Structure formats: C-alpha cells, structure tokens
Image (spheres, helix red, strand yellow):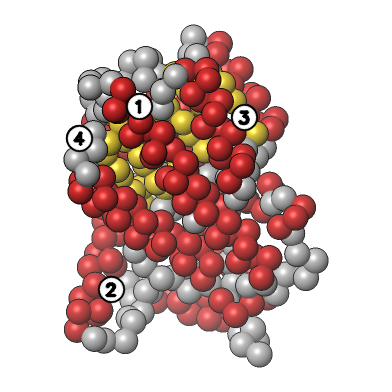
Amino acid sequence: MNDMKNRVAVITGAASGFGREFANQGAKAGMKLVLADVQQDALDKAKAELEAGGAQVIALRCDVRHPHEVQALADAAMKQFGAVHLLFNNAGVGAGGLIWEHTQADWEWVLGVNLWGVIHGVRIFVPLMLECARKDPSYQGHVVNTASMAGLLNPPTMGAYNVSKHAVVSLSETLYQDLQMVDAPIGASVLCPYFVPTGISQSHRNRPEDAKDDAPATLSQRVAQEMSNKAVSSGKVSAADVAQITFKAIADNQFYIYSHPAALGNVRQRMEEIVAGKNPGDPYEAVPHIREMLKEKLRGAKA
C-alpha cells in the first residue's frame, strides 16, 4: 500500500501513544482519519489539533471490548468516508503481577481490550474492506495489529499481558495467511514494540468501572507497576519513531514490525529452546542484576 493520499485510516487507541502518532503520520500522508479511544477529553483534543492542521477527522468514543461499539465505529467510517483502507487495531492496556494473582477482572479487562478488541476489529472491518475491494478494482488495504515483544517472549510478572499479546501475534499471522489464501488486495502486519515511552504503564487510569476490582494490589502487582513505569519511561525510541517505522513497513508490505531489533536475540534464544525441547531459559541472563532486584522485591510474595 503505497499511495495513502485521500485513503481512510481507522485507528483505535488513537488519543495517545502509538495511536496518536499513527494519526499524525496519516495526516501528513493526506489520509482521512477515523479516531477511536475511551478517553473522551484526549480524543477531542487530538481531533481538534489534527483538524487545525487541515486533516479530515471524525472521532468516536469506543471501548473495543464491546462489539457493538466497534460496529458503530465501522458504520460511522463508512457513512462519512465511504471506505476503509487502513486499520490500526491498536488499543491496549497492561496489568502486572504474579500470574496467579491476576483477578478475574484483570484477565477480562486485559484480554477484553488487547485480544477481543483486535478480534472485533478484524471480524467487523476485514469483511467491510473486502467489500470495498470488490467495488473498486484499484483498492489497496492494510491491517496493522499492535502486539508487543511480549507477544514473542514471556517475561515474569506480565502474565495476562503476555497471554494477550501472544494471541495477537497468532491472530495476525493467521490473518496474513488467510488474506493470501483468497488473493485479497489487503496486507497485514503485526507491530511488536519493546519499551517505548507511552501511557501503557498508566493504562489503569482509563480502566472502566465495569472492569475494576476492589481487591487491594498485591506486593507483586505493586512491584510490577513500579518496574513497568521505570522501563517504559526510560525508553529511547519514541512513539513517533515507531509510527514512522510502521508506515514504512506498510508501504513495503512488511509483516513483522520491530521497534528494537536488537531484542530479537532473546526471541531467537526462546525459539531454539523450544525446538531443542529445553526448559524456558532465564530472560535476564544478560542483565542478572535486574533478575536479582526483581526477586528481592518479590520476596515474601510467593504465598
């Protein structure tokens, strides 16, 4: 997908982080934008700023956990612009702690946004995009699903997040193969960023009332939050950098998109362990001081 001028991009999680930067890149390319987010004030601000720059924008509050809200987003996009060419299933949240300490509400929230949001996006938008292609012989489309390096690795104290992102990688690889099988003029990519300064470590700020849990945070959850805050805020690659990398990958029809290719050494190690039938290795082998610091902080959290 090379010519993006006057094409239509739908972006979930569009009010901040990667989504906001995808919108910026889309506006620079002359795209028409359909923005979705659960944070209304940030969404309104993004819309106003992009319109001030000359972009055509519609913005809807959308909780991607709910299929009827994703359907409403699709309906609005088609009513306003008549087609969808580029879909970013980008909305995401995080929750940490020892995996057995995730509550049911934690699991439902993280999987609801990170996985079911992508499922709803693919299920609702891809048939719509295929219909657009049937009506327009020159149609080109692309779907980008935001996963994470946590979709290729399994660091400790990130259980629900890891599970959701591994599923997104699997879904995306299957989507790619299925689109190839029917010769669709639609590409697919999976974005696997590492630590990038975005609002992901503070995603609990937008946790809906129906997804909240009254249980107090455990020691491991507090430790995971502390380490996530530090790791995310210290990232040297920006969300704008990732958006530029992503748009180039779309133009090049590149499936796997990485913000930190150097981290793939850990992925290679994991794959080699799987093929060899070995037990999972130490994810902190190269940085043992971090492993020891984490173990020290978690001391007493095993019970």
Q: Nearer the viewer, mark 2 or mark 4?
A: 4
Q: Callout 1 environment at 10 Å: few (<14), some (14 to 19), or many (20+)?
A: many
Q: Secondary structure at mark 3?
A: strand
Kindly identify the amino acid type of the residue bearing the numbered disc 4: Asp
Q: Secondary structure at mark 4?
A: loop
N-term-proximal mark, 1 vs 3 = 3
Which residue is the site of mark 2? 270
Q: Is residue 72 above or below residue 237?
A: above
Q: Nearer the viewer, residue 132 or 64?
A: 132
At a point 19% along the width and 84% down the height, the residue shown is 276
N-term-proximal mark, 3 vs 2 = 3
Report the Cα–Cα distance between label 1 and label 3.
Answer: 22 Å
Which residue is the site of mark 3? 60
Q: Is residue 37 above or below residue 300?
A: above
Which residue is the site of mark 4? 252
Kindly identify the amino acid type of the residue bearing the numbered disc 2: Arg
Report the Cα–Cα distance between label 1 and label 4.
Answer: 22 Å
